[in-house]
Amino acid sequence: MKANILLHHSKLAEYDKAAFGRTIQSVFAQTEQDFELTVIVDSEVDAILEQIKLFNTRSVKVNVISSGEENLSVQLNKVFKSSSADGILYIDNRNQEVVLKKSALEICSIATQNNANAGMIYSDYELSGKDGVNEVRLLKHHIGRVRDNQDYGKVFFLTQQALNEIGGISEDIKFNALYDLRLKISEKSDLLHIANRYSGALYRVVSQAKAHNVFDYLLASKESQLEAEEILSAHLKRINAYLEPGKHYSPRPEADETATLKASVIIPVNNRPEFICDAIESVQAQTIKEVEIIVVVNGGDEDPTVESVKNYLQGGEKYDESKPEVRLLIHDMNNLGLCFNSAAKIARGEFYVQLDSDDQLTPDAVEKVLKVYESDPKIGMVIGSYEVWEKDASGAIKRMEEIPVVTHDEWTEDNGRNNLLRINGAGAPRSIPIKLIREIGFSMNEEPFARNYGEDYQMVMKISEKHRIGRVWEPIYKVIRHSGGTDHNIDQNTIDRNDEAKDFMRKESILRRIKLNK
């Protein structure tokens, strides 16, 4: 199998001439020698060719393509169309130094020959930075891996047959060429992941690992986000999983005789006595008084949160008959689905309103949510917007001004439920008719990797397939960040497990959508 090894030389790269030399050296050191080299350059062509000659002792054919001002999609298509090789080993070294292991090309060649439907091969890799060298283990591909920020690494073996079948990348794409390429190949061919227990990486990336930040998506450019949305929508249309605007909507179920109140605010909590009081009091301060608060302590009778909540029950020192009633459920296992489903069974409100135990509702939150429901009987869920606050050591909270109000305004009436599959959230707080919760039910962690994570995201997907999603664009919720929170200081294993859980839910949603469209 003859290969074309494709890489870049970019003046915008984080590495120097010596680092580029190490990349070239690793190419010519391959145990599989049947290849030619193609380099996409944006400057200094002669100097680059001289550097390549130092390592090209076998007179391997070298092709140089000047990138000019062309998009990556155009650059790659030029190579795809002109290549006479059986496959292309693409090294995405536009920004970072990438060094191949000597057997990288050979293992890709063998894997391709052993898997007739393989269209793209990707692998685990080593990341070299200030903390030393760490192995980055990637996730296996499946139909639910449609996030645009999914890590597939920096080196890909692309079969020419797969490239011919997809007809290349859309050349008007400016920011997300590899996202479009991956989705298109996945529609007709297999994406194979090569992984070993240890010391099995096919290459090394020289860069400092970036800390995880759940708010990174807020920093992405609007133009890039819209382009990625268009790429995903086109992919969903090609696999018959796209939901047309307004299609499949039906009215939400009407409340039954148990709904004697407007809303039930359900608060699952585990060992947070220092937060629960502020959460409860934010509900009791609502402009709509026909609400109840159901606190579900899932740490058992010994959980210190129980005593804090009992202060708001009849006979407690904070009990006030004139304020919305506080009810208490106690479970001895930490299962969020159990918390939501058991609370919904006894709820007296027509609608559930979300409140995490360490967060707070603004006084008009329930009022604004109810107004959205009143606007259309087909609305099966209302999602609000939130501000991010931070709690310091003294217990005081302060608005994090550097983070804008989180509106998830990428959600549009026409395409929000399709774009939802690309991103990891939909906003907060979420509100669902209690009757709908009883019919659908929150996940009880039955799905692979779902360990008290993603159950609310899954509900948004399920409900949006058959009902409209209403929105409150003003901030009606305060997310409180603190040292014990679950949205930061997350290790890579937890990130991977969470991604596995949500991607499985995406997979199930895509399969439901294909069935629904049939």
Image: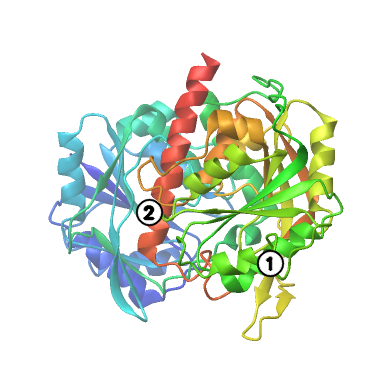
Looking at the image, is mark 1 or mark 2 earlier in the sequence? Answer: 1
Residue 363, x across and y down, in percent: 83, 58
* Residue farthest toward the right in the current orientation of the protein: 287
The residue beneath circle 1 is: 316
Q: Residue at the spot x=55%, y=55% of the render?
A: 68
Residue 329 position (above or below residue 432): below
Q: Residue at the spot x=57%, y=50% of the render?
A: 175
* Residue farthest toward the front in the current orientation of the protein: 315
Q: Which mark is residue 497?
A: 2
Residue 145 position (above or below residue 50): above
Element on which disc 2 rests: helix
- Identify which amino acid the numbered label 1 is placed on: Gly
Q: Nearer the viewer, residue 302 or 291?
A: 302
**Residue 151 in view, yes or no:** no
Q: Residue at the spot x=69%, y=20% of the render?
A: 250
- Identify which amino acid the numbered label 2 is placed on: Arg
Spatial separation of the CA atoms under disc 1 and disc 2: 41 Å
Asked if residue 411 lies left or right of residue 119, the reply is right
Residue 504, x across and y down, in percent: 41, 40
Q: Nearer the viewer, residue 385 or 135?
A: 385
Quarter holding residue 279: bottom right
